[in-house]
Image (tube, grey):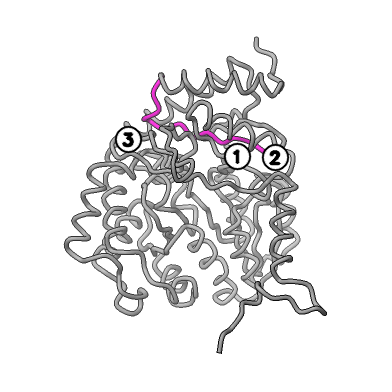
Amino acid sequence: MTHTSKFQTQKSQSPSYRDKFRAAVDTVRREGRYRIFRDIRRKKGAFPRATWFKDDLAEQDITVWCSNDYLGMGQNDCVVEAVKSAVDAAGTGSGGTRNISGTTRYHVQLEEELADLHGKNAALVFTSGYVANEAALSTMSKILPGLHILSDEMNHASMISGIRNARTHKHIFAHNDVADLEAKLKAIPLDAPKLIAFESVYSMDADIAPIEEICDLADKYNALTYIDEVHAVGMYGPRGGGVCEQRGLMDRVDIIQGTLAKAYGMIGGYIAADRVVVDAIRSLASGFIFTTSIPPSTAAGALRSVRILKITPEVRTQHQTQSNALKARFRAEGYPFIDGDTHIVPLMIGDPVKCQEISDRLIEDHGIYAQPINYPTVPRGTERLRFTPSPFHTEEMMDELMEALAQVWDAYELPRENVA
């Protein structure tokens, strides 16, 4: 008997399933926020250079300006060698969940290294930063019945998903607004369990949370603190422990969440906390229990990367130097960008169609890749190109970017700010 796909047939009394899916995509296209995935291959040893495969016949050399491999560790020879050695020693996949044969020596060593990085006595590795947030936060209500979670309004989608799935009391406070946070804390009974969830570096707006003030409120109102440091681990602090380490606040935050996929150049996420907290999440989080663990080679590469960045603060200094250099150039030319305190440089466009078109022109005409950032990643009307200069973006590359940007900016008659 031959079965026909529901997408190939249509019953007369009901609309086509295919039409519904097409309509959903058409809506996204009309709004100018249809996402184009650039087909690229990075060039080992030449970061941030890459090859863009425009189609089956054409290739183009490009410079990547939007990578989250902030320090180029995904290209680091020592990290690459660690991955290769682990494959030779252990093969490819882990072979199971962490509970069933998927905990290897590499996983154990990596968790020990991450716990040490954050001054905690335990850590737990997940398959991604998204999963770490979603799994850890969604589990909190199982551990703390009647819990109230207070979440910054600009928190990442993974945190929002975890909090939504926690089946608990939820409160949203204005972004980085400690007065609003305190007002909401005051309205909750003092003896009720509470958790404040926020980020250190907000990657789309390039700002940093008032961590110390939030910790003060947590102490005052008997709340736990949960901080997402994914855009800060490896990047800030003497050993790369994040903004909490940089500001001497690691001991005041109860649960620190991070990623291995940005500064460390690998894939995976983690939490670090007191051993009893980690053990409870390890025992109850479905997102940890029921998924295959990251490959041993991935854990080995991440382990090497964490160890390297612990002892090479100079790469963080160079990174900040290059980030500040790009900001200075944008500032001198009057480009409307968010002049924040972090390594991220968002160039504001404010229109989804123009944002995509400018991105297209930069890569097609100038070999410069800067991905447009649209809703729902950022609010409507705040569309932007998000630049992430690395220690390996040279002055020559910046010259190329500024020349290309000037041409495209003028072609679209976009405004510039007054230059003193």
Q: Position of residue 399 (x, y in %)?
A: 46, 18
Marks 1/2: CA–CA distance: 8 Å
Q: Position of residue 58 (x, y in %)?
A: 44, 38
Marks 3/1: CA–CA distance: 31 Å
The quadrant where residue 59 appears: top left
The residue singled out by tag 1 in the image is 372
Q: Nearer the viewer, mark 3 or mark 2?
A: 2
The residue singled out by tag 2 in the image is 352
Q: Can you say whether 168 is above or below 182 in the image?
A: below
Visible in this render: residue 328?
A: no
Q: Quadrant of the N terminus?
A: bottom right
Q: Who is closer to the viewer here, 282 or 395?
A: 395
The numbered disc on residue 313 is 3
The quadrant where residue 69 appears: top left
Q: Could you classify mark 2 by the number of other residues whose Cα lies within 10 Å: few (under 14), some (14-19), or many (20 or more)?
A: many
Highlighted magenta segment, given as a residue range? 382-395
- In the rendered structure, which amino acid carries the disc numbered 3? Pro
- Magenta segment, prevailing SS (helix, strand or loop): loop
Marks 3/2: CA–CA distance: 38 Å
Q: Who is closer to the viewer here, 211 or 287?
A: 287
